[in-house]
């Protein structure tokens, strides 16, 4: 992904006006459970920043701390130049937060929900603003429908619309596309990019790799710790992972599957192989040590019907490897 | 985008909340219907009890003597249609048993030597024991009793003669004898006029408490609190936005109850309607504030409802609605002073029945206002602005 033109390239010194989110040593504990552990990150203005990590890794918790809905146990930081510890109310006036779980009023109609938001933020002419938002969202015909009766995808659209309506400077989107069909997701991302082009900063959490690749920068957290950060290319390069892909050619689907399963089992057990993942009739084999990986696959190179090639690790390979590594160290 | 500051911003946000709450309120048809039905239903039920002027209430008699006077009294009682003598008891014990068993509601005992004492001017006693578990039913009859006996005696020319005979005594017909009334099981013997104001207070307490008690916990349970908290709204604004729509509901209920009370049961309004409205408005807001406070303390809707009932029960029992306030032990009176219903009952009974004006109501009005502010203060302080 290329950097936005508006955001100055280069990661040298950043003026305060250039930074949307800057947090340092953020920690949050629920009982004995350390959910966010010493998190430090910076998001520049106008950036689309992807927030990835397995279930329960602390993404939602971090986002809540950013907009003052949770109080960090340690650490400090600013959001749009305002202190997250003391200026929660001011921050909220400029931030649109889309919750992971739909949290608009199900017993209010689509339009009533939008009007409520408009009034609450002091948008002039709330009825007109809500109507305009309806049209922008393509929800025009559904204004009178109860929000609770919308399908999942339409609920997400409404929630995003409600976030954008007051014209925030920062969007915090918590899994905005979970359960949304590919077409709607594509439209959604087109909209996010359009907003970013207007100067909005977007922090978006997701479990989808393709969405991660649509972000300017990503952060990967697991067990509350930030494990990787940067552009997708940087994160892949920094992983130090080496990957081979092997395709099964010239065999029926049954035989091919059999072969893939066999190979997968053998390779998984082999030294130097850290990860094996099947993709249809091909297999991804990755390892951190290039020489060891070569040695591990050498015995199978001569087998019939197998076509080997050196490959780039995917983001998914990198994330799963990061998570495993973290697991092993725990 | 800048959130509006100052009064305009404040009003805008409160309005947003009010509109939202109002729509939700009207959309929940069942709740809305109950809000109107509860007061009407209660009134009709109680009204039936009040309106049925009790007649031919079963009564037992135990007369120790069989004199002209005793016969005259019994005949007069029989003539009033209030009483119907079902049993002639042979002993006090038997009569007591009849009352306990519920076979009779009254038991009249004329003591031995009644006529003789009457003639001597000794003010003999007639005992009337009443099962006052149904205060409305027995109240009227008891009230009528003394007059009936007196007129019976006058008619029989006993009293006039006695009055002359009793030298040096300023005897009136009432003085010549004494009716000792024992109200059993309900010492207060709440009268019908007390019931409508009392009902007004208790119904408002119950409905107002419950409505706001559910308001915050409902947002938490439905997950909408997370969005709401992420918006630039202050707890005071949330509270006002959630209370105001229900003030309207409260006013509607109060008008219904009072209107029905006036039309159906001829409850008087001796005092000023404006003062009554002000007192009722204050009372409604105080209860809504307390309910809202519960809502900020409770973890879920069930807890909020339980808290409301924990508050509602003492309100009924210790406010003077059920038992006379002054008859309660000191500690109970202290608790009672902490309940809005206590103050409201005093005010509304005063206004309706005694014609009390502002100056008579200052103390209770101030107490009510204080309780309201206290509740609001706790609610705002306790309102969780984060999800921690
Ligand atoms: N209010 C809370 N009380 C106690 N534990 C909590 C609370 N909120 C979150 N947790 C715990 O904190 C951890 C991180 O939760 P969080 O919701 O931040 O994860 P996440 O990264 O958003 O996960 P997902 O991808 O499933 O949404 C989880 O183990 C969760 O159980
Ligand atoms: Mg989450």
Image: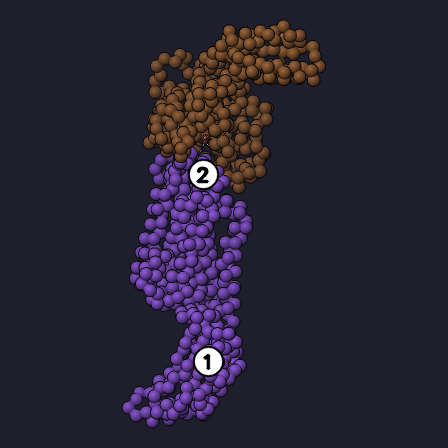
Chain colours: A brown, B purple
Residue B333 in picture, x, y percent from top left: 33, 62
Viewport quadrant of the N terminus of chain B = top left
Left or right? Give the position of A125 relative to B337: right
Residue A168 in picture, x, y percent from top left: 43, 28
Query: Toward which corner of the image does residue B311 lie, by quadrant?
Result: bottom left
> What residue is shown with label 2?
B225
- Of B214 and B370, which appears nearest the observer? B214
* Furthest-top residue in this view: A302
Who's the residue at 37% across and 26% down the image? Answer: A26
Left or right? Give the position of A40 relative to B263: left
Whether discs 1 and 2 lie on one chain: the answer is yes
* Furthest-right residue in this view: A252
Who's the residue at 59% across and 26% down the image? Answer: A181
Mark 2 nearby-residue class (10 Å; few <14, some 14–19, many ≥20): many
Structural distance between the alpha carbons of marks 1 and 2: 66 Å
Residue B93's disc number: 1
Q: Secondary structure at mark 2?
A: helix
- Of A11 and A232, which appears nearest the observer? A232
Q: Secondary structure at mark 1?
A: helix
Who's the residue at 63% across and 8% down the image? Answer: A307
Query: Toward which corner of the image does residue B144 lie, by quadrant?
Result: bottom left
- Of B318 and A37, which appears nearest the observer? A37
Left or right? Give the position of B160 relative to B263: left
**Which badge, 1 or 2, is on the more N-terminal residue?**
1
Q: How many marks?
A: 2
């Amino acid at each position: 992904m290329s950097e936005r033109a508006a955001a100055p390239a280069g990661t040298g010194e950043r003026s305060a006006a250039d930074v949307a989110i800057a947090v340092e040593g953020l920690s949050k504990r629920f009982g004995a459970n350390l959910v966010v552990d010493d998190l430090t990150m910076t998001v520049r203005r106008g950036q689309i920043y992807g927030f990835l990590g397995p279930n329960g890794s602390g993404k939602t918790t971090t986002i809540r701390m950013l907009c003052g809905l949770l109080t960090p146990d340690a650490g400090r930081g600013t959001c749009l130049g305002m202190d997250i510890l003391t200026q929660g109310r001011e921050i909220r006036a400029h931030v649109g937060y889309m919750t992971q779980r739909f949290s608009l009023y199900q017993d209010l109609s689509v339009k009533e929900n939008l009007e409520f938001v408009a009034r609450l933020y002091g948008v002039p002419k709330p009825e007109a603003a809500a109507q305009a938002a309806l049209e922008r969202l393509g929800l025009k015909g559904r204004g009178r429908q109860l929000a609770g009766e919308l399908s999942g995808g339409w609920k997400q659209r409404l929630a995003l619309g409600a976030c954008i309506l007051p014209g925030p400077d920062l969007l915090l989107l918590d899994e905005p596309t979970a359960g949304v069909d590919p077409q709607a997701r594509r439209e959604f991302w087109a909209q996010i990019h359009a907003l970013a082009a207007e100067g909005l900063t977007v922090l978006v959490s997701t479990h989808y790799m393709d969405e991660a690749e649509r972000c300017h920068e990503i952060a990967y957290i697991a067990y509350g710790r930030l494990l990787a950060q940067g552009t997708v290319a940087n994160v892949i390069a920094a992983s130090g992972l080496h990957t081979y892909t092997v395709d099964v050619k010239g065999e029926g689907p049954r035989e091919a599957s059999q072969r893939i399963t066999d190979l997968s089992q053998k390779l998984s057990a082999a030294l130097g192989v850290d990860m094996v993942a099947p993709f249809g009739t091909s297999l991804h084999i990755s390892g951190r040590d290039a020489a060891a990986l070569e040695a591990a696959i050498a015995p199978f190179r001569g087998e019939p019907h197998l076509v080997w090639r050196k490959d780039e690790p995917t983001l998914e390979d990198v994330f799963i490897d990061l998570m495993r590594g973290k697991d092993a160290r725990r | 985008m800048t959130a509006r500051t100052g009064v305009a911003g404040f009003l805008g946000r409160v309005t947003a909340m009010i509109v939202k709450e109002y729509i939700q309120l009207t959309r929940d048809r069942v709740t809305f219907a109950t809000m109107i039905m509860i007061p009407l239903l209660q009134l009709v039920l109680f009204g039936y009890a009040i309106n049925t002027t009790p007649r031919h209430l079963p009564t037992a008699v135990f007369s120790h003597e069989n004199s002209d006077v005793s016969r005259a009294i019994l005949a007069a009682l029989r003539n009033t249609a209030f009483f119907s003598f079902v049993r002639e008891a042979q002993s006090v014990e038997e009569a007591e048993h009849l009352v306990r068993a519920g076979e009779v509601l009254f038991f009249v005992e004329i003591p031995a030597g009644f006529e003789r004492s009457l003639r001597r001017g000794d003010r003999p006693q007639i005992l009337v024991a009443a099962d006052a578990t149904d205060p409305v039913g027995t109240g009227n009859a008891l009230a009528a009793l003394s007059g009936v006996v007196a007129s019976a005696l006058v008619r029989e020319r006993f009293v006039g003669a006695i009055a002359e005979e009793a030298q040096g005594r300023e005897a009136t017909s009432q003085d010549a004898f004494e009716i000792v009334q024992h109200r059993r099981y309900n010492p207060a013997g709440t009268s019908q006029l007390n019931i409508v104001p009392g009902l007004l207070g208790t119904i408002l307490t119950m409905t107002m408490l419950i409505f706001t008690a559910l308001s915050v916990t409902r947002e938490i349970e439905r997950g909408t609190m997370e969005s709401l908290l992420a918006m630039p709204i202050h707890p005071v604004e949330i509270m006002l936005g959630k209370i105001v729509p229900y003030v309207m509901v409260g006013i509607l209920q109060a008008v219904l109850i009072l209107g029905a009370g006036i039309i159906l049961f001829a409850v008087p309004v001796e005092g000023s309607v404006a003062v009554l409205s002000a007192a009722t408005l204050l009372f409604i807001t105080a209860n809504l504030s307390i309910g809202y406070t519960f809502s900020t303390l409770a973890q879920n809707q069930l807890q909020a409802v339980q808290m409301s009932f924990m508050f509602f029960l003492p309100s009924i029992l210790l406010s003077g609605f059920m038992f006379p306030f002054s008859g309660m032990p000191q500690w109970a009176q202290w608790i009672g002073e902490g309940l809005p219903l206590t103050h409201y009952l005093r005010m509304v009974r005063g206004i309706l029945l005694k014609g009390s004006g502002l100056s008579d109501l200052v103390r209770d009005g101030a107490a009510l206002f204080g309780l309201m502010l206290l509740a609001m203060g706790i609610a705002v302080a306790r309102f969780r602005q984060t999800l921690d």
